Amino acid sequence: MLQTFETKDVLIKRPVEMVYLSFSDMEQLMERLPQEYREKVRVNGDSIEGEYNGMSLGLSIVEKHPNSKLVLKPTGDFPLDFSLIFDFESAPEYSTNLKISLQTQMSWVERALVGGKIQQMLDKISESLSAKL
């Protein structure tokens, strides 16, 4: 069964074009990584991949709608197939509303077991982004 987890809208005080570019350009994303991780991470066009605990983990952009939406899928050794969706909406005063969603196939039992952790992860990501962008 398709399960969807999503964050509340986060207001980022930058124009939608700048916010979208910072997510859709993997080179810019790489520049934001702490220095100690950069040598373990590779960027190739619309994908980013790195090593973590002996596993190869990455994300690849599979769908782009300029200044409105990005969809990423996992690559490498992720134990879960999912779609990570970023929805961007222009807001007043040159700001952007951002909503992050994660869609995956899982049973109700799996959702009961790991759904809370997935939601916490998304909420932390959105809080971190609103503070850093």
Image: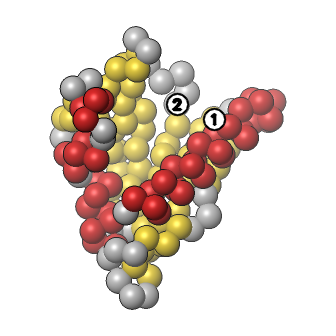
Label 2 sits on what residue type?
A: Asp
Q: The C terminus lies in which quarter of the figure?
A: bottom left
* Whether residue 96 is situated above or below residue 48 in the rendered picture: below
Q: Is residue 130 visible to us here?
A: yes
Q: Which residue corresponds to mark 2?
A: 81
Q: Is residue 1 visible?
A: no
In the image, residue 98 sits, relative to residue 64, either above or below, namely below
Callout 1, which amino acid?
A: Gln
Element carrying mark 1: strand
Q: Residue at x 60, y 52 (%)?
A: 123
Q: Secondary structure at mark 2?
A: loop
Q: Residue at x 43, y 70 (%)?
A: 12
In which quadrant of the rendered image does the N terminus lie?
Answer: top right
127 or 99, nearer to the observer: 127
Q: Could you tell me if the residues under marks 2 and 1 are in contact, i.e. CB atoms within 8 Å?
A: yes
Return the mark for residue 4: none
**Residue 85, position as x, y percentages in the image:** 47, 52
Quadrant of res 112: top right
> For mark 1, what is the residue?
105
Residue furthest toward the top?
Answer: 54
Which residue appears at 35% of the width and 83% of the height?
Answer: 94
Q: Residue 80 at what x, y percent from top left?
A: 55, 27
Q: From this view, report whether residue 111 is shown above or below residue 7.
A: above
- Figure label count: 2
69 left or right of 84 in image: left
Q: How far is mark 2 from mark 1, CA to CA? A: 8 Å
Mark 1, Cα crowd under 10 Å, few <14 / some 14-19 / many 20+, is some
